[in-house]
Image: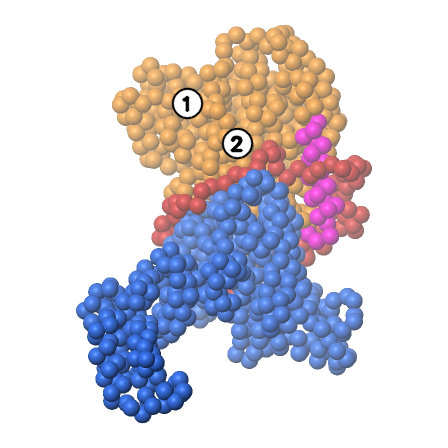
Chain colours: A orange, B blue, C red
Amino acid sequence: MADLNTLTLSELSDKLAAGECRSVDIVNDVLACIEERDGRIGAYLTLDRASALEQAQAADAARAAGACHPMLGIPVAIKDLINVKGQPCTCSSKILEGYVAPYDATVVSRLRAAGAVLLGRVNMDEFAMGSSTENAALGKTSNPWNLDHVPGGSSGGSAASVAADEAVCSLGSDTGGSIRQPAAFCGCVGVKPTYGRVSRYGLTAFASSLDQIGPISKTVRDSAILLDTICGHDPMDSSSIDLPATAFAAQLGSDPSLSGMKLGLPKEYFVEGMDPEVEKAVRDAVEHCRGLGAEIVDVSLPNAKYAIAVYYIIATAEASANLARFDGIRYGLRIDGKDPIELYGRTRAAGFGPEVKRRIILGTYVLSSGYYDAYYLKAQKVRTLIRDDFAEAFRQCDAILAPVTPTAAYRKGEKTSDPLKMYLDDILTTPINLAGNCALSVPCGFASNGMPVGLQIIGDAFNEEAILRVGHAYEQTTGWHRQRPEW
Amino acid sequence: MEYEATIGLETHIMQKTGTKMFCSCRHEYGAAPNTHVCPVCLGYPGALPVLNEKAIELCCKAGLLLGCAINPYSKWDRKNYFYPDMAKNYQISQYDQPLCLGGQLEVEVDGAMKTFAIERIHQEENAAKNTHVAGGSLVDYNRAGTALMEIVSEPCMHSAADALAYMNALKQIMQYGGISDCDQEKGQMRSDVNVSVRPVGQKELGAKVEIKNMNSFAFIEQAIGYEIDRQIAVLEGGGRVAQETRGFDADRGETFTQRTKEDAHDYRYFPEPDLMPVKISAEQVERWRAELPELPAQRRARYVSELGLPEYDAGVLTSDKAVSDWFEEAMRHTDNAKAVSNFIMGEMLRLLSGQGTAISESQVTPEKLAAIIALIDAKTISTSAGKQVFEIVFNEGGDPKTIVEAKGMAQVSDDSALEGWADEAIANNPKSVEEYKAGKQGAINFLMGQVMKASKGKANPGAVMQMLKQKLDA
Amino acid sequence: MSNATQGMDVGYVAHLARLELTAEETALFQGQLDQILHYVEQLNALDVAGVEPTAHAIPVYNVFRPDEVGRSLDHDDVIANAPSAANGQFRVPKIIDQ
Ligand SMILES: [Zn+2]
């Protein structure tokens, strides 16, 4: 075993191009690693080894025939809420039992077109509702840095698989932090693209106006490569924006200087209850960026503190409608009843886990007659204020530096009994989804318990170039990302 | 006490698009169940709707035909309710910003012109089709997600006759406009009817009763009649009419309680995050307006003013768009509007109704009718021969001119031939000649008839008359 | 929002959402949701008069598709996913008019 699975996407891409290894070798190493470790990690829900190897052989054949793409032959783990034709798509829920996707999500079509190997499907919080991957009906996932700790969520399987070298890179989805937070907890890089940058077609919707698919990887460059591959206009998604083709990876140079860049530091982002170790790691990262030539400016996001209230109204309202389709009639689980009403009630009672039920009820309530204006409409208006804050901040800087989470990864079970407490941890990530901006998480140190800490770099809408540049420069000059969990 | 009924209609009309409202599945009636379905219209996880441009155009054109203003900004909303015919368990509709606002429909009811106000037209999606079988129901999603627009009238009608006239006019306009075929058998036009009754003179409206989802005009008429009587009876009896939703039992001709106000739905409307709002510019509206077809009322007026047809003819010709289109086509081949009108209203409609076929399928094409009329106008054949030719073409097809020649139907105007027949008639009927000379003008008609008989109908009647008069008056 | 402190009728809302809850779930959710609604009440402090609501993160208009027929799903795949089917259709318990 050459341990190809421990290399980065970009390193593997170079090796493949140079003929130093084959896709089949990479996939074999990744499969061997999964075999060895996934019993402890629990990242994968389904894995079709034969199919993965077949795709790898096809990629090798394509390369021999002259094809080239940085993703050609690279295995990618897919969060289990993205539809891949012919595969289950459980969303970690019992309600999608038996469902076989009859179509490919647009991101999946793009990966196929690039020749990537669709590796398997990884665990998540049910319907992406959660921050620890503990709300998962079909299996539990552990943090590779400490198996007693949560990997974060909802894209916990996506982050844990990459951190454990069980995948070279993965796709997650981010509605309120679900890529950035698990990436931070697992010491990976994760990017939440600007809303409209990546097609949502085929992504099982949690909150349609907030959801974005994005990459989780070992380096910023790897995320850039994956993002270049999956983004772009899609006529199947009305919210996808028609913009010129991107070259995020190509724009990442070797000069780590940040001179000429203004980086904002929002005072509201160092919140009460923040772990001082996390705060220190982030403040050190800010100083590091200053050392790279960036000008650090104070910015203010005065309404960010309302983000949790706004988020849990808007996201649950949209979810209450989005999840209404899981009714036991056209696909998935069904518990029969004497009439459709009884069938729905029973099917949904048996199929959804407690967190999903809680959020559906909350979302239904805030839209119901007599409460709409007080909750939903009000939240939409405060959302405007939050967007305006960011717009104002980006008049003063090119990107914003902040923590991803108030604490590093915590122990399993620590917060499961108190939903509100768990929600409050999303305070630093949800504002970005509400505003529609882009942001990434890059490793910036460790807490004293040995768990990784993430630095959040927030960009204006469609300015992924800026956050990738800052993240890449930071990463190249620090090396936190090269630290791996021990096995 | 005297009572007054107030009626409003919410009419759902399926637009004539090739594909569904939010996905590219074919919109086709009568296909095998669940063959025109995709992740979008089946409500699969991850599927997203995209607006059908043609449907938006048709909805706005329907609005323009009804005198609506096109909303410069309109948006989409989710209407939440669980029902097996709604794949996502919410319907994409338009709540507070529909495509079309305001509008009116001018209609003749019992000889008087009335104007009925239209509140709005919004675009939404159709439901699937449920069929009841032993022990359950079956759902076919072919119809699910097809383009459906809802035309909401003001509560401005007062009788079943008003409602019927409104719906007939609406149907005619939608057909003329190419918006919908409004085939009620295929569910392309259905109405919810709101009926309330109040004592004459009372300002506020009575409690509103909604009768849901009716496609037959006859049933709607019956239901309204029944409901007005029922509500008056309740009020007369000192009771209160309950605000509720009622169904119509066609077998009994009665309405019945379906859902009371207490268990009314809470639809939880909210803006559809998957669809972007629509902005329509004044220029776009004008482009669409320029493309609008002529409406029946406009056509009717033009037939009178420009073609010189009697009001009656214009009314008959325009009452059915297919007939009117046929007439228009015939007018491209002849200038004799009255002759075309006479043939359509006479021979054509009589023969069609006997056969039960559509005018578009007739073997007499507009071009062939024009040819027949040309033969008559050139006096090659008589009018009665023309009718015979028409009937032959209608039944057997063929070219009018060839038929006239083959059957020797050309009429005779040649003086030498007529002279023989005229002399013969005068010689054989001295009594009629006597009478005519004594001043009884009508007697000449008998002689004329004799000439026509002798010529086997081929003599040109005008020429015969002239010759007889010449001879007798000499 | 003043009603929030009185708590929501979890049973009624769950029925609207077609979720059959056990008594334990209802009691558990009642407490948790009341707590969340109480938290959300902080929005009351904000004056949003004159503020436009945001429904879409990125404002875009007029996204259409042409009225052209595309591919539908294979009928067998569609029915294969159905928990219960008959005659090529989805089978459900008898639908009563709502
Ligand atoms: Zn479809």
- B36 drawn magenta: no
Q: Chain of mark 2?
A: A
Residue A182 placement: quadrant: top right
Marks 1 and 2: in contact by CB < 8 Å?
no
Q: Is residue A375 above or below residue A62?
A: below
Are labels 2 and 1 assigned to the same chain? yes
Q: Nearer the viewer, mark 2 or mark 1?
A: 2
Is there any visible trace of residue A104 in the rendered image? yes
Span shown in magenta: A368-389
Q: Chain of mark 1?
A: A
- Given residues A62 and B251, the one toward you in this image is B251
Q: Is mark 1 within 8 Å of ligand 1?
A: no
User: Where does the image place residue A282, in percent across and percent down from the top left?
Assistant: 66, 18
Residue C56 placement: quadrant: top right
- Given residues A368 and C84, the one toward you in this image is A368
Type of the residue with mark 1: Asn
Is there any visible trace of residue B412 in the rendered image? no
Type of the residue with mark 2: Ile
User: Where does the image place residue A210, in percent across and percent down from the top left?
Assistant: 59, 36
Measured in 3D between alpha carbons, the distance from the residue under mark 2 to the one under mark 1, in whole angstroms, is: 34 Å
Q: Is residue C65 above or below residue A286?
A: below
Q: Is residue B349 above or below residue B96?
A: below
Q: Is residue B336 above or below residue C25?
A: below
The residue depicted at 61 percent of the width and 52 percent of the height is B68
- Given residues C93 and A142, the one toward you in this image is C93
Mark 2 or 1 closer to N-term?
A: 1
Q: Secondary structure at mark 2?
A: loop
Where does label 2 land, which residue?
A241
Where does label 1 land, which residue?
A5
User: Where does the image place residue B212, in percent across and percent down from the top left?
Assistant: 58, 66
The residue depicted at 35 percent of the width and 18 percent of the height is A16
